[in-house]
Image: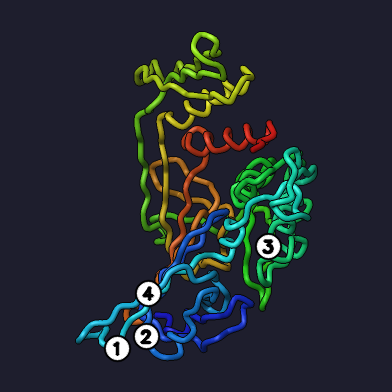
Amino acid sequence: MPGLLDTEVTITDRHCVPVTNPIRYVEVDAEIRFNAIVAGSVIAPAYAELTEALLPGHRVVIRDQGAIFKSGPIEGLDFVRTATGPDAAGRWMVDFGDDGAHLANRITYPDPSIPATEQTVDAQWTGTGPAGTLILDLVDDNGGPAALTARRVPQLVIGDGAGLGATLTYASRFQDLYVELRALAVLGGTGVPGGELGFRVRQVDRDLVAEVYAPRDRTGFARFSFATGTLRQLQVTTEAPTCTVAIVAGEGRGTDRTIVERVDAAAVATWWRSEEFVDAQNEADTEQLEHAGDETLDGGREQLTITTETVDTPQVVYGDAYTLGDLALVLPGPTTPVTDIVRAVRLQVVPRTGRVRTALIGTQAAATDPAWVAGNRTLARRAARTERI
């Protein structure tokens, strides 16, 4: 069983400078996700060095077997002390995020070179080029070295990934930066393994490096099955459709409104007719109304979702055979093999009982995950028009 020192927890300041030695802890629960932000937690006794380090703006860094597994800013603190028992001296529960959370705290300025109060009505950020380049440009302009001084994320630098992905023309104005990055990652994923670019912010020495990458095809090495002991759980969930007919109303009032009906004939024949009204008051274009109806149908379609939970073995080890964002293969037995991106990796450590690291691989095939299709359709609609406020 790996020892406590295989997983180290350190507190740093906002500039990635350590302010503690590796701390004493009683539990670590840290997860990382592909193109998503997720919180982690550390539970530790309340001793002086740790208590003095838990300040606003400070960060938690988890190193597992020598490599940084997860790092990010402290987002919440919970202190507990009891009269007797193991918490008589006090206990801290520290919630922390990913360093990518700084990007989720930014919006896209139409003209990133001037303050928000000086933006004009017609200004918008626009770019044409490979999706990876656009992602890094947006990060740089709204939180990187090219951003206004007050908006720069401490220690953030721009890394590799320019030139990756399909070439796009994209416009943005006062949108959530992280949502825009996810849109570009999906829309620029043509020809990329898994159909989606990856982006992340990770600590390298004392820098926070924003980078874009293409998922690697590791299906020849990262193969999970019950027979080999690498597959812990498989779940297949089927749900009936919630919408098979979408009635979409465009701009205007009363009889002046354009009404479009979109029908999923196959779902009606297989299941039943289930109608939903879609109020698209801001849309005048018939094609956009049809897209809105299709988006609603996709969101309400029959769902067949496959999720898996894997576990490392000496033959298949995270960081060697695969890592977050790689393409892996699941061999569930009697059902069809699943090939998809490693969507999440979770590390749980309790020094008294040991450590467990698991990966989540879920199908995103269009035929089996309409929620993903609906998300792509929404992003495509956003890319097809200029959003203004």
Instruction: Using the image as rendered, state which of residue 175 and residue 295 is in the foreground.
Output: 175
Q: Which mark is residue 89?
A: 1
- Where disc 3 sits, the SS reads helix
Q: CA distance from mark 4 to mark 1?
A: 14 Å
Q: CA distance from mark 3 to mark 1?
A: 40 Å
- Determine the residue positioned at 56% across, 16% down: 252
Residue 22 visible in rendering: yes
Give the mark nearer the N terminus: 4 vs 2.
2
- Determine the residue positioned at 62% across, 67% down: 202
Question: Where residue 261 appears, x then y in whole percent?
Answer: 50, 14
Which quadrant of the view contains residue 69?
bottom right
Q: CA distance from mark 2 to mark 1?
A: 7 Å
Give the mark nearer the N terminus: 3 vs 2.
2
Disc 1 marks a residue whose amino acid type is Ala
Q: Which mark is residue 93?
A: 4
Q: Say if mark 2 contacts mark 1, CB within 8 Å.
A: yes
Q: Nearer the viewer, mark 3 or mark 2?
A: 3
Residue of label 2? 46
Position of residue 70 relative to residue 359, above or below, is: below
Q: CA distance from mark 3 to mark 2?
A: 34 Å
Position of residue 283 relative to residue 370, above or below, is: above
Give the mark nearer the N terminus: 2 vs 1.
2
